[in-house]
Image: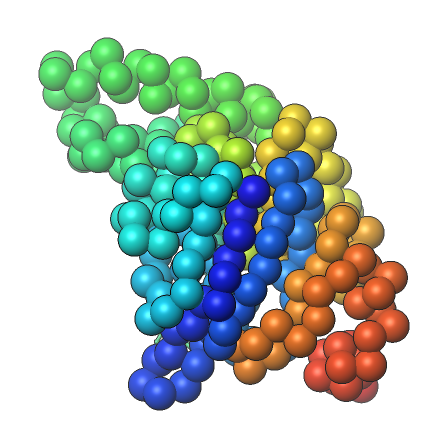
Amino acid sequence: MIVVDNLSRSFGGVFAAREVSMSVAAGEVRGVIGPNGAGKSTLFNLISGHLRPQSGTVSLGGTRIDTLPPHRRAELGIAIVFQGARVFPGMSVLENVAVGAHARTDAGALSAILRLPRHRRGESEIFADAEAALERVGLADWVSRPVTALPLGQQRRLQVARALTAKPTALLLDEPASGLRAPERQDLSRLIRELRADGITILLVEHDVAMVTSLADRITVLDLGRVIADGTPDEIRRDPAVIAAYLGKASA
Ligand code: ADP
Ligand code: MG
């Protein structure tokens, strides 16, 4: 479904992605792991269109998408939750999700908030979508609460809800569990499994090796911008290159 072929991107001469190739099947949960600075976020941003590659291609369902801007890729079904994504303080939970959805429609988030007449119809649809997405992630009881009332685990679910308003076929989650406590991680794992059961393909960057091996069908391991291993969680756990580059360090 998502095919990344020989993708390279450097910053000031240092490769953040170096000839990265990866093929993700529809309905799969793909874990992406690697040490800090390995190029995980760069890879996700190259897939979502927030970064352009210097060489290589990205295809979705057989169609090249690597020259398309992010909003076009979003229309084709790719949604991303950025690493460290923040909420907008001073707004309700519902408004937070609606503003994200509205920004993507290109109609201008500000006019939605100001309730300008020409956007009124579009606006009500956006709020309905936002509410449905919040229900989907289990935040129905929180819609009118100030967003700052949400514990961190719920804020992460809100970010997922915002991404779901685009009705994605592929959802890229960049460290959604960072900073979460064990029960919140388990809740998030459950949500990811449910989304997969709904037919959404999921790409997940996650540092918690136990969490990613329990969730992922396959794992891609990056180090210094390169793919150093790609396989089932069992294969990855046993891979000497992975142990040397990553798992060894993590447990040291
Ligand atoms: P990861 O997500 O695996 O921690 P990143 O993709 O964020 O890694 O970063 C990979 C490398 O690329 C790092 O060396 C980082 O400093 C560099 N890098 C990433 N984004 C930028 C940028 N916008 N400008 C300059 N260097 C960047
Ligand atoms: Mg990162």
Which residue is rendered at x = 12% and y = 16% of the image? 118
Residue 106 percent coordinates (x, y):
21, 34
Q: Nearer the viewer, residue 21 or 76?
A: 21
In the image, residue 34 above or below residue 76: below
Q: Nearer the viewer, residue 164 or 142?
A: 164
Residue 37 percent coordinates (x, y):
53, 78
Q: Residue furthest front?
A: 62
Which residue is rendered at x = 59% and y = 59% of the image? 22
In the image, residue 157 above or below residue 67: above
Q: In the image, 189: left or right of 239?
A: left
Which residue is rendered at x = 71% and y = 59% of the image? 219
Q: In the image, 204: left or right of 90?
A: right
Looking at the rendered image, the quarter that the C terminus falls into is bottom right
Q: In the image, 215: left or right of 132?
A: right
Q: Residue furthest top?
A: 121
In the image, residue 38 above or below residue 97: below
Residue 226 percent coordinates (x, y):
57, 76
Which quadrant holds residue 222?
bottom right
Count of residue discs? 0
Q: Nearer the viewer, residue 11 or 21?
A: 21
Q: Is residue 238 visible?
A: yes
Q: In the image, 196: left or right of 127?
A: right
Query: Ligand 1 sits in which quadrant?
Result: bottom left
Which colour assignment does the render follow? rainbow
Looking at the rendered image, the quarter that the N terminus falls into is top right
Which residue is rendered at x = 68% and y = 43% of the image? 28
Residue 91 percent coordinates (x, y):
35, 36
Q: Is residue 92 visible?
A: no
Q: Nearer the viewer, residue 189 or 6?
A: 6
